[in-house]
Amino acid sequence: MEPQRGENLLFPQIRCLNLFHLEPRLVTKKLDPVITEFVRSIRARRRYWARSYAGWRRFRRAQPNTAHYALASLERIGRVHTMVTQNVDRLHHRAGSKPIELHGSVYEVICLDCGTSISRESFQEQVKDLNPKWALAIDSLEEGQPGSSRSFGMQQRPDGDIEIDEKFWEQDFDIPGCSQCGGVLKPDVVMFGDNVPIERADSAKEAARNCDALLVVGSAVMTMSAFRLASCLIGYRDIKLIINPNPRLAHEANAPIAAINIGGTRADSIISLKINARCGEILPRVLRMGSLAVPSIS
C-alpha cells in the first residue's frame, strides 16, 4: 500500500519518516534553532542527511489525499485564484495544483554559500556514490530484510521512521558539498529559526489583506509563519475564499474567518466559523456546492 498524507493534510503520526527533525537533544538542550544547529554542527548535518537519505524512497512514494484533490479541482474549475502552502512535500503539485511553496520544498537542495540549487534526486545520487554501503542498507530494508548483514544498523519502525545506530552515521556517512564552491548543502526548506523568503512572504500577505473571506484548513496556526503569513490561499470569483492564510492580516482587513480543523487553533479568538472535522471529509463537499458563504464578524 502506498503511503498517503492523512486527511487533515498531515501524516497521521508526526514522526512518520522523521525527514525534517534533527536529534531532539541538539535542539532542546541548547535551545538553538534547527537552522543554527544545522549550519554550525557537522554532526547535526550528518544525522539529518543520513536519516533523510534513508527515508527518501518511502517519502517520495506518498500520494495526495482527498483534500489535496478537492483543492486542485477547485483551482481547475476556476474557483481558485491563488494557493500558497507551507507543506514541503509537493503533494499539492501531484494533485494538480500550482501553489506558491511558502516554506520551500524538499525536492530541491541549495548551497548556503553560493546559492547553487540542485534537485534532490541528484543529491541522492551523490550521497549514494559517497556511501555505497548505505545504498546496500537501504536496498535490504526495501527488500524486507532489516535484520540482514547489509542493513548497516538500520531498522524501519512501524510508523515508517528509520532508526539508525548513532555509530554508523557518525563514523561511516559522508555528506557531499556544493559542486560549485564546496559549501554546505541544505534542503531548500524553511527550518525552525530560518526566515521565509521576502518575495514569498509578500505574496502571501497581499493575498490575505485583499481577501473577502478567509478559511484556515488543517492547521492549528501555532507557528508565527502560519499565524502571520499563509499556508494555502484560495480566491473564489465571488467571495474570494482563502485557505490557510494569515488570520491576523485578514482580521485587520475585516474579512470574516472560518476554519476546518480538528481541535483548537491559535486564531480561535478571531474565527467566526469553526468546523471541527477532517479536511478530507469537508473539502469534497465544498467542491460539490454551488457557493460557500462565510459569516461576517459581528
Image: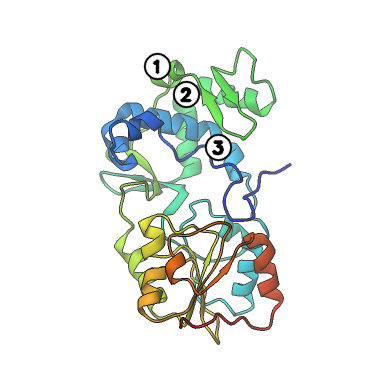
Mark earlier in primary sequence (2, 3): 3
Q: Residues within 10 Å of mark 3 (few under 14, many from 20)?
A: many
- Relative to 65, is 113 above or below? above
Q: CA distance from mark 2 to mark 1?
A: 11 Å
Left or right: residue 193 versus residue 282 is left
Left or right: residue 237 versus residue 222 is right
Mark earlier in primary sequence (2, 1): 2
Q: Is residue 245 visible?
A: no
Instruction: Tell me which amino acid carries mark 1.
Output: Gln
* Discs 1/3, front: 3
Instruction: Tell me which amino acid carries mark 3.
Output: Leu
Q: Is residue 138 visible?
A: yes
Q: Residues within 10 Å of mark 1 (few under 14, many from 20)?
A: few
Disc 1, SS: helix
List x then y, in percent, for residue 80: 56, 76
Residue behind mark 3: 17
List x then y, in percent, for residue 97: 57, 66
Disc 3, SS: loop
List x then y, in percent, for residue 177: 34, 34
Residue 89's label in the rendered image is: none
Residue behind mark 1: 171
Residue drawn at 68 percent across, 20 percent down = 145
- Relative to 60, is 212 above or below? below
- Contact flag, marks 1 and 3 (Cβ < 8 Å): no
Residue toward you, 213 or 265: 265
Q: What quarter of the picture does the N terminus occupy?
A: top right
Residue behind mark 2: 131
Instruction: Tell me which amino acid carries mark 2.
Output: Asn
Left or right: residue 85 versus residue 174 is right
